[in-house]
Amino acid sequence: MIKIGIIGVGTVGESVAQILEANRDIITARAGKEIVVKKGVVRNLSKPRNINIPLTTDADEVLDDPEIDIVVELMGGVEEPYRVVQKALQNGKAVVTANKALLAYHRYELQETAGDIPFEFEASVAGGIPIIKSLREGLSANHIESIKGIINGTANYILTKMMNEGVDFAPVLKEAQELGYAEADPTFDIGGFDAAHKLLILASIAYGIDAKPEDILIEGIEQITQDDISFAKEFGYTIKLLGIAKKVGECVELRVHPALVPQSEMIAKVDGVMNGISVIGDKVGETMYYGPGAGGNATASAVISDIIAIARGGKASPMLGFKRALESGLKLLNRDEIVSKYYLRLEVADKPGVLSAVSKVMGEQNISIETMLQKPGKDGKATLLLATHICKESAMQEAINKLQTIESVKERPVMIRMES
Amino acid sequence: MIKIGIIGVGTVGESVAQILEANRDIITARAGKEIVVKKGVVRNLSKPRNINIPLTTDADEVLDDPEIDIVVELMGGVEEPYRVVQKALQNGKAVVTANKALLAYHRYELQETAGDIPFEFEASVAGGIPIIKSLREGLSANHIESIKGIINGTANYILTKMMNEGVDFAPVLKEAQELGYAEADPTFDIGGFDAAHKLLILASIAYGIDAKPEDILIEGIEQITQDDISFAKEFGYTIKLLGIAKKVGECVELRVHPALVPQSEMIAKVDGVMNGISVIGDKVGETMYYGPGAGGNATASAVISDIIAIARGGKASPMLGFKRALESGLKLLNRDEIVSKYYLRLEVADKPGVLSAVSKVMGEQNISIETMLQKPGKDGKATLLLATHICKESAMQEAINKLQTIESVKERPVMIRMES
């Protein structure tokens, strides 16, 4: 028998307890042992819950219980879970966590403490999709050339609605909040920070990169308008918030931002709250993994798959994790060195000389323009939409800085990177 | 150091040897040991090859070599590889195979012989996609409700071309043959037999079903015409050759056939030679796995992932395989008991009374019609296209038998099942 303690019994924790009960027969058969929740740790004992497990408010009752084999950390937050997981590992307990923020900041220290003790985190990225096992086990013969993921369901829901229904950002966000797909403060999701946490986890497994969220390029979807959507549609693209990890020589580029993705790519077809991760291996080519990125049962499915793996494998076969990444010796690419095609939207005064002034700035930065569209606006204004050929991020940032000094350019240009 | 012998050094075997060489650094790091090909077994020693490994024509030189730890079986065929794999396992060697035909017929006997000796076969289904590891490991908390797979690239290439370019079956098949996507005798692929082999492997892992290809419903794509494609498009479907395994109470239904799939489903978007497998778990919901289903490097990527797993895990953690399926105690559903919606195409004489005769037959079988379209044809003929509500396979087969006895019905009706 394997005894587990769940620290943090919210939606996911309740689902873990419920599924262990509902699917007890198959889970016992697959794990080779019965798995029992000995205790759950909550903040508020009097809150009604749909589970039947002993509860406490004291995490140490789990952490110091010699009978508990696996600690399942589902608290949320960073520093308090860090203390809890450290102590669990120090006490020799295996740990399963779904906490992406914790891992975004402390994954290397925790893996160091874990040593040969199982420390698993399948649920921390893309909910029910077994992307971490697929990377570590399924694609182990490959150098990973790139990972491109739609790994935030809230942002994908909003962009899908904007794309399919022609609705603006603000009303779609409001609807997403009403449906419970977006938080009251949605910054974490729509600003790209949640996706960045998940990207860092994937990038560490694939590339051994010890970066923090602050180290990488993160942009959100707040500035996207129907003008951008129309341009995307006209030229065969869709707009997605992507987390991208890409090997470039001995460096790895890491970035989270909205991107124009060709509609023909499989990842462009991942709609609504669903998640999808495309991985290119040097030998296998592209594989893609699709499924629910959130939700109690989907996330719990991943948590329990880790528990089953630990129960079956014990300490015999430590998985490839942060300490033993698929690659090593790679460095984070300076964000100025990123190359991409870019789309720009400029609100300009509708008068002679504007096009020439814009073209001049681009030319000075050696950026060549592939497509340009001018759309009439109101009050003597026009919207200028353009797509560039490949250029360096530093050149593009410089161009944007200069473009907004042109008198006829009314606002800071909006830039979206183009993937292909 | 792990020494392997490769029996059957064709496209995939060459790729295995080449990748082990090209990616030696990362593979050694991931496996924790160096992996060396000690010998390859071929039929013809004088054939030029792009690899540098010792070759022999005598399989026993590998099977009886006490230094060889893992036998990689890539021969093709059924009975000769069966003898080879049996002997390898009896000699205590781990086995990795990509041979779906072998597994379609002998997976249970081989797993029985293997006992605790690693016996792995990730490459046998969907080439480079780690679908078997995902089923066994990633979704282990779930009852698997259904598996729907596009698991034959040749058939999917042909159907995609027919769908996108309005071309008929025969010329597309010819083109596929010229491009090397279809064999000179394409029956195995377009008749659904290859997909059936793969489906049986997945179904055995998920449901413990010991069925043979002869036991299950298999239909090919040969009869599909542009009439069917037009109907599909008009009503929001695409046509795909699917392998379907579905749990129905204590039974499992297994079938391979072309199907009308709603365009909104993720699996409908898997085009060309690519493979995709949608799996529905009772807790996680739908996850989908996409990638190349064939090709030397993609298949070798899966073969090597098995070799690495064996090198790392040894015998400590026997994977869930045929002997320890995810479910047990389920029976194969009699094919007459399958329920589905159906699409029918009838070539009829364009004269009064036909519609009423057709409707009468359907009514007698208690089949209700959801949609009906009549298209004028040449020489006083017409094409009748209809879609039914859900009914039993046995009722539909009976209806088809009766429909062709109607004098105005010129040919046996073509039936395609509808998935939704």
Image: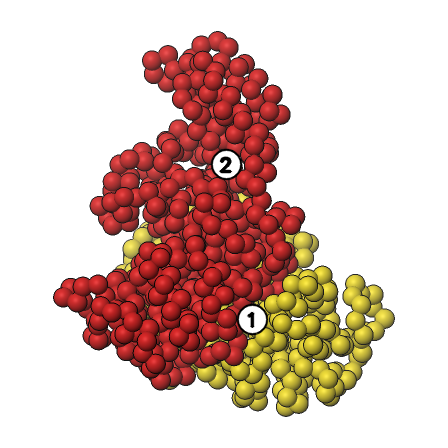
Chain colours: A red, B yellow
As drawn, the label of residue A376 is none
Which structural element holds mark 2?
Answer: strand
Q: Residue at x 47, y 56 (%)?
A: A201
The answer for which chain carries disc 2 is: A
Q: Is the residue marked by circle 1 packed among few (<14), some (14-19), or many (20+) residues within 10 Å?
A: many
Residue A234 at what x, y percent from top left? Answer: 46, 32
Q: Is residue A419 visible?
A: yes
Task: State the residue position of label 2.
Answer: A417
Q: Quadrant of residue A51?
A: bottom left
Q: Which residue is mark 1?
A: B122
Three-letter amino acid code at the position of disc 1: Glu
Asked if residue B341 shows in the view, the reply is no
Q: Residues within 10 Å of mark 2 (few under 14, many from 20)?
A: some
Query: Disc 1 vs disc 2: which is toward the camera?
Result: 2
Residue nearest the viewer, comparing A91 with B238 = A91
Q: Residue at x 43, y 24 (%)?
A: A412
Check whether the beta carbons of the residues at disc 1 and disc 2 lie within 8 A of each other. no
Estimate the spatial distance between the alpha carbons at disc 1 and disc 2, rounded to whole Å.
Answer: 37 Å
For disc 1, the chain is B
Image coordinates for residue A420, horizontal then vertical, percent? 55, 41
Residue B255 against residue A393 in the figure, above or below: below
Question: Where on the picture, by quarter, is residue A232?
Answer: top left
- Give the x, y percent position of residue B223: 51, 59
- Of the pair B155 and B99, the residue shown nearer to us: B99
- Residue lying farthest top? A352
Label 1: state its secondary structure: helix
- Vertical position of residue B215 compared to residue A212: above or below: below
Q: Nearer the viewer, residue A205 or B47?
A: A205
Looking at the picture, how far across and down is residue B75, in whole percent? 68, 75
Give the left or right position of residue A109, taking residue B37 as reference. left
